[in-house]
Amino acid sequence: MNKIIYADNAATTPIDADALELMFDLQKNLYANPSAAYKLSRPLKKILHESREKIAACINAAPNEIIFTSCGTESDNWAIKSAVLSNLREVLSNLREQPNIITSAVEHKAILNSCAAMEKLGCTVTKLAVDKSGAVNPAELQEKILPQTKIISVMLAHNEVGTIQPVKALAEISHAAGKIFHTDAVQAVGHIPVDVKDLNVDMLSASAHKFNGPKGIGFIYIRAGLKILPYIDGGAQEFSRRAGTENVPAVAAMALALEKNCRDIEINAAKTSDCAKILIDTLKKSNVDFIINGGENRLPGHLSLSFKNGDGETIMHRLDLKNICVSTGSACNSRQVQISHVLQALSVNPNYIRGTVRITFGRENSYEDAEIIGKQLIKCIA
Ligand code: PLP
């Protein structure tokens, strides 16, 4: 088979070779339970501690503010659901006021369906609109906050269109109203600088497989002092905040992958941005009619392109026949033929909306990959 060109890095990234080696090595050689008291488990405790320190340093947090989870989805569920449940006593004492959650119309399903689950339990959910670039307007948040709002959650960078949200301004408004602010930073961590103190967020979700770490591991940042119920109850792991025996090999691999990506963040961003530019320049040299979604302030190397009168599914399958991997929307809903809630919220021109594909470059892509994708896209559209 010819070489595969993988350009779907927002869906997942290839695992870093050093992280993989470390994970295998630990899985094979350090199998003790990190909670055990004998000396065999001591190195595991140390690895957990050091990994927490490394991850904390990457986002300017304190180590005890990092809690390991199984994925970004778990971190998101924890933030939304526990923010409401942590206030249950207050909620029950005032049954006339349904607890409210504020989020945006373009969140990932991990947030939207967590909100929907809380809606079934009696919460109200307010979804902030977005402009054509996919960005929310902080002034709308200011208007929509209610006394009974328990949490505000807006993602840092968008998984379909790459838009970077004004999270710092949103957090400021939330705090001025005395509310908890969470951000889903699954697409941002390891790709753009993330500083939790500067952003002033209370909680932040991240997932290792989006930054060249292994699948099935992630973390949540919870600001020191924030009272939030555990989402998974059981043993005393993770400062008694997230029960379950820690996956130490995956945690160590996640920390190493994040450390490497943060070290090279500017180099990788420059390279993936150049790949995106080469692809766009290649398309512009032809008479293919397309638009770029997501405005100017986007993740590096992230392209959501809509082709006039095109069909995203067909383009994706034709590229697949040429060993090129891209997606039509977010990976989680690539089997659905409906137009994504995100493109609808952005009011993408109806003549273009069906012809949308997402091409997301990663650190492993070359300029040649970008040119080949551009040329193959031109052939598909023709
Ligand atoms: N949030 C965003 C913005 C995502 O892009 C994703 C994955 O696509 C998730 C959450 C879910 O992360 P995970 O796959 O680790 O559960």
Image: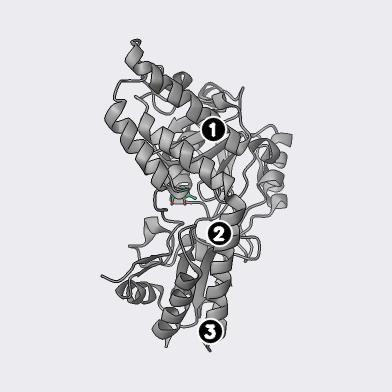
Q: Residue furthest left?
A: 1
The residue carrying mark 3 has its beta carbon less than 8 Å from ligand 1: no
* Label 2 sits on residue: 162
- Give me the disc on residue 184: none
- Lateral position of residue 122 relative to residue 284, left or right: left
- Residue 281 percent location from the top left of the image: 57, 79
The residue carrying mark 1 has its beta carbon less than 8 Å from ligand 1: no
Q: CA distance from mark 2 to mark 3?
A: 21 Å
* Label 3 sits on residue: 289
- Give me the disc on residue 54: 1
Q: What's the amino acid at mark 2? A: Gly
Foreground residue, 82 or 61? 61
- Please give the name of the residue rendered at 65% of the width and 46% of the height, measured from the top-left corner: 167
- Lateral position of residue 75 relative to residue 146, left or right: left
Task: Quadrant for the N terminus, please.
Answer: bottom left
Task: Work out whether 7 lies above or below 171.
Answer: below
Q: What's the amino acid at mark 3? A: Asp
